Structures are given as C-alpha cells and as structure tokens.
Image (cartoon, rainbow, N blue to C red):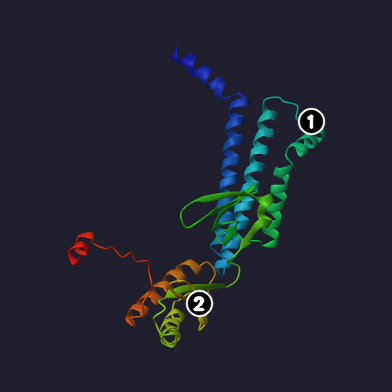
Amino acid sequence: MIKKIFEGLLEFVTKKEIYGTIIILAVNYFLYHTICIILESRIEKSKNDFERKKRKTIVSLIENILKYLIIIIIAVSLLSIYGVNITSMVAGLGITATILGLALQDTLKDIINGISIMMENYFVVGDIVRYNNFTGEVIEFGLKSTKIKNHAGETLMISNRNIYEIVNISQNNQNVQIEFSIAYEEDVDRVESVITKSILPKINKIPSVKDDSSLFLGVNALDESCVKYLIQYHCNRDSQWRTKREALRIIKKELDKNKIKIPYPQLEVHNETKIRSKR
C-alpha cells in the first residue's frame, strides 16, 4: 500500500508539468531577487546624497520593469509546458496589441512619462515636491505612478501622466522666508537691532543654513494688532522644515530675552458681582 502511494507520488512529481512549473518559478524568483540585490548594492556606492537618490529612483524603475518581464516570461514558459501553442498566440498578438493599446491609453501614457521623468531628472526618490496643495517627499517611483508622503504621514499617489503638474522644491538650495509679529508698542529701531544683531547671527549657525545667508527684509505688514517683520535665509535641500523650526525657536528665545512682546489674542472678562458692588 505504501509502495503504491510512493510510486503514485513519484509519478506525479516527475511529470513535466509539475517539475517544470517548480523549476520555472524557482529560477525566475532567484533571478529576480539576485538582480535586485545587485542593483541595490549600486545605491550604496553613490558619491553624494543626490546621486544616491537618483540611483535609488532608477533602481526602483528597473525593478518595476523587471517584475513585469519576469511575469511575462513565467506565463509564456508555463503555457509552453502545458502544451499551449505559443506561435499562434504570437501571430494574433498584433490585433490584441491594437485593442489593448486603445483600451490602455492612459496606462501607456503613464509608462512613457515615467521613463521621461527618469531621463530628464524631474525628481528622484527622496526629493520634496508640491502637487496642488500637497507637499511631501517622493517615497516611491514606478512605471505607472508616483507616491508622495507628507509630514503628517499621509500618502498621495499620482499617475505619471500628471507629473507635469508637480513642482520640485528640493533640486537647489531652498530660500526660506519667515514672517513674525511684534506688538505695536515696541520700538521699531530696537526690534530691528535685535533681529540683525542677535537673531540672524544665531540662524546662520544652524548647520543646514548656508553661510551668512540670513537677511532681514524689513517690515512686511501693518496688521490690526501687530507689526509683521520678514527675514529669509538659504538652506540645504530637504532641510527647510527642520531649519525653519530651529529658526522659529531662536526668534522666540531672543525676543523673550530682550523682553520684546509677541502679541496674541486676549479676552477681557468682567465680574458682574464686583461691578454691582462698586455701584
């Protein structure tokens, strides 16, 4: 009984369809992951951060293309093993391609534009970009779409055919402007002196800020309850949010140190009992 079961199992395993399927899947799986490991090892050999991100983008795109190619190779190989006439299928591929081309116009646009993005360096994985009112980091770039993640952890997926609407804000040094409010009763000359002599020198010492790039631009607005002052500085790519937080901290500490009032909404509450007693 056991011998018959073993013989039946052996006969099943030795069928061309069975061992052929296992070999095809194993070989292609090994091939895909080996190529991916080799490609990703190239990222570590980048000379600088920009080159690393560019290589990461190219590797991501190649891995996407490779994945689809492997799927096609597996499908064709399995069909051949199971006796499907591949030649006749290839003969009818022209008509099928025409039909698919009409049905998948948008997908083809996505793929073509994805290749164009890579060739033209519109952006790379890790760049900060703005799409309409959504600003974030490019975390994934594929043949059909691009994923952007903002500081709140929200992820936006955009079809590559719409990439022309994206603004890359991290290819060059960032120009950051900060506007802050001061109470009207503060002396303008004294405020400007604190900004130029205390605040700007400390902002210049932030590691990502370009040397001596901080600049006082003057009074920017006269609002109902405050005077608004404007400063700016240049910083490294992708560091504008971190440097802005550090700069705001410096501004607050220096204003407090020099006892310069930052206005904020206040509500005056009258005690009705005390008012009546006074009467």
Whole-percent x, y for residue 12 in the image: 56, 21
Whole-percent x, y for residue 62 in the image: 64, 51
Q: Counting residues from the N terminus, which is met first, the one under dot 1 or under dot 2?
A: 1
Residue carrying label 2: 230
Residue carrying label 1: 87
Whole-percent x, y for residue 71 in the image: 64, 38
Secondary structure state at the residue bearing disc 2: strand
The answer to which image quadrant residue 69 occupies is: top right
Specify the farthest residue to the front: 279
Q: Residue at x 80, y 28 (%)?
A: 88
Q: Is residue 220 left or right of residue 193?
A: right
Examine the rendering and report whether any part of residue 192 can be seen: yes
Q: Is residue 105 left or right of residue 213?
A: right
Estimate the spatial distance between the alpha carbons at disc 1 and disc 2, rounded to whole Å: 71 Å
Callout 1–callout 2 Cβ contact below 8 Å: no
Q: Amino acid at mark 1?
A: Thr
